[in-house]
Amino acid sequence: MTITVYIPPDIEKRLNENILNGDKDGVRHLLVDAIEPKVEELLNNKAQYSVEELQSMLDQLIEEFMTCVGPDVPPLSDYALSREGIYADHL
């Protein structure tokens, strides 16, 4: 998903100034303020996908996954999926 956020010129100027000054908190606050309206818009316009669209997206995800791991990837063992296996390095 690509989300386009409009940043007004005055905010862009302040953003660039904060970046040049190394002000991480200032940059963070300006970006949060800039994307907040877009987040509200996305939450208010919940997308409704058809079964065909969902199937197409799932097929694409499967294809991308198989491209990354290859066709001969072994399945995970029962131990790897167990609580002990997941948290083994945290004991």
Image (cartoon, rainbow, N blue to C red):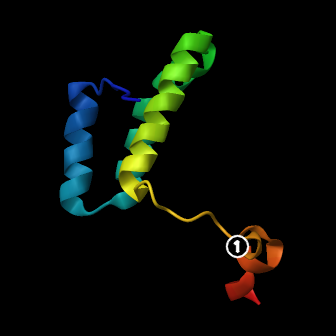
Is residue 49 among what the camera can see?
A: no
Decide: is 62 above or below 4: below
Question: Which residue is under mark 1?
Answer: 80
Q: Hey, which quadrant is residue 54 in on the image? A: top right
Residue 91 image position (x, y, % from top left): 77, 90
How many numbered discs sit on the rendered protein?
1
Q: Is residue 76 above or below residue 26?
A: below
The foreground one among 76 and 7 is 76
Picture quadrant where residue 19 is located? bottom left
Residue 80 vertical position relative to residue 48 in the rendered view, above or below: below
Q: Amino acid at mark 1?
A: Ala
Tell me if residue 5 comes above or below residue 30 in the rendering.
above
Residue drawn at (20%, 27%) of the image: 9
Most distant residue in the front direction? 72
Residue 68 x, y percent position in the rendering: 38, 54
Residues packed near mark 1 inside 10 Å, few (<14), some (14 to 19) or many (20 plus): few
Q: Nearer the viewer, residue 41 or 80?
A: 80
